[in-house]
Image: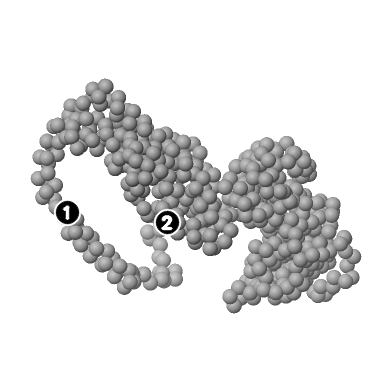
Amino acid sequence: MTLMATPEIRTPVGAVALRIRGLRKTFGTKQVLKGVDLDLHAGEFVTLLGANGSGKSTALKSIVGLQTADEGLIEVDGAPATADPTKTAMVFQQIHLVKRRSVLDNVCAGALGRLPMWQSLHPWLFPAALRQEAMHCLDRVGLADRASEPAGKLSGGQQQRVAIARALCQRAKVVLADEPVSALDPNASEQVLALLAELATEGLGVLAVLHQPELAMKYSSRLIGLNKGVVEFDLPTPEVDMSMVDALYSGDQK
Amino acid sequence: MTAALADFSTAPKPPARRWPSPLMLGLIALLIVAHVFAWQGTDVSIKSLIEGRKGMADFLDEAIPLDLTWSTVLRPGLEAALVTLYIGLLGTTLSIPFALGMGMLASRATTPNTVLYQATRSILSFLRSVPDVVFALIFVCAVGLGPFAGVLALVFHNTGVMGKLWAEAMEETDLGPRDVLRIGGANGVQTALHAVLPTSLPQLVGLLLYRFDVNVRSSLVLGLVGAGGIGFLINEAIKTFKFDVMATHILIVLVLVIAVDQVSAQVRKRIGA
């Protein structure tokens, strides 16, 4: 088995949703990303694995502009990522819902990027069509019956699913998930990852950072191993064995 | 029991103790010197405090019993106290739009750029540094003696204080929801309205109530410089040596302030701010 990535021989699931070439980022003297290449196709659930400091989160943050890469190409749906931010959504470990607002209002907020200014001054002004679309998204994550409750009343796993519904309501092509289940109990973690995997089969591109290799192997179609800012392997899940994953984390134990 | 007998000598040695640095010792010395000068500069004297006991007793002698005549003292006093409350209420409410607008520009969570951020922060700190009494004196000259001058004074000063407090409250809230919406393509105004403001609302309301509480107390002092309300009556009573009348008014003030303080504290407790 080779450790080198050979993207050419894989049959892509759909069109390329996210294309990254030569991504580099340096903090002070520490080079966090040393030329990362990555393709994410529509319909794929890809997981980035790697020890703390391997550059996983920095890569995700560079895609959505929370951080600026020093060098590299980032394309979403064939255009520079900055061209249309609504095409990329991100879910976080900390979930980041507005807890005092209703579940429905939180989901609707995903659509702000395409709403005219006057309709986005207050949730009261959200158009009926948007509220209906948001209900559809909530139904998709199985929480339509909780729409009117304050988001903070829901459990952690349910809140994460609301955050995913918000990404759906944004009509994103690519969903990035930065440790989406690190704060959840095992059962809720499985639910959230199963949902993301299911959404991927429906045509979404999902790129996740996970700290649980077992869960990553269970739900993702492809695994990418990052080690000190370098792609160590990029393989369909069945071709990855545990020893390769263990090697990613052992390098850190000095 | 066993712990006292255990031998810890094989454990690693603890790191050396850290003593205050020479800089810290110097600062402490400087602070002590400053207090000595302050003590002398303000004529602090235990002796005059003890000797002043007699004057205090004379004063209380004249103030008690209180003058509780309904038509000439109590009724005007209560009416003026209501005006004082009104000054505090309007002064606080009318400053909300200015404090909110400038607070959002002066908060790192919502400001569109650093030039506006610095500019609004300077304006707010100017409004804050001019005491409300000085504003009141200015507005008494502009719009004449009376409560309206007090309202204007509070609006100006309170915009400065509340704008800064609100800006800081917005900066301290979790900025995650803001980032999520920004990633999804929402603009600055949208992220402010749908992430920063709703997240920090309990804190903003708590600060508003606290400022209302402070402003009602300030409007008493504003009365002393001619801006209406019960402060004006207290000033009159002092000038005419009617200490029993003054004591009645002060009692009314005490009840008013405690009532406002309690209501504001209760509401703040309920909203968890």
A208 on left or right of B107:
right
Q: Residue at x 38, y 60 (%)?
A: B5
In the foreground, A112 or A181: A112
In this view, A76 is above or below B55: below
**Where does label 2 land, which residue?**
B125
Count of number-bearing discs: 2
Q: Residues within 10 Å of mark 1 (few under 14, many from 20)?
A: few
Query: Residue A217 sits in which quadrant?
Result: bottom right
Query: Please, which colouring scheme is shown?
Result: one colour
Question: In x, y percent, where is residue A140?
Answer: 78, 44
Question: In the image, is B94 to the left or to the right of B30?
Answer: right
As rendered, which of B273 and A241 lies closer to the eye?
B273
Say which residue appears at 19% left-offset and 56% top-offset: B42
Q: Residues within 10 Å of mark 2 (few under 14, many from 20)?
A: some
User: Which residue position is annotated with label 1?
Assistant: B44
Give the spatial CA distance, label 2 vs label 1: 32 Å
Which disc is residue A139 wearing?
none
Q: Position of residue B59 (x, y in %)?
A: 15, 36
Along the viewing direction, whichever of B145 and B5 lies nearer the viewer: B145
Mark 2 vs 1, N-terminal side:
1
Q: Position of residue A53 (x, y in %)?
A: 64, 69
**B33 lies above or below B191:** below
Query: Which of the two residues, A250 or B231, is positioned nearer the viewer here?
Result: B231
The answer to whether residue B260 is visible is no
Say which quarter of the image contains residue A29. bottom right
Asked whether residue B144 is in view, the answer is yes
Residue type for callout 2: Ser
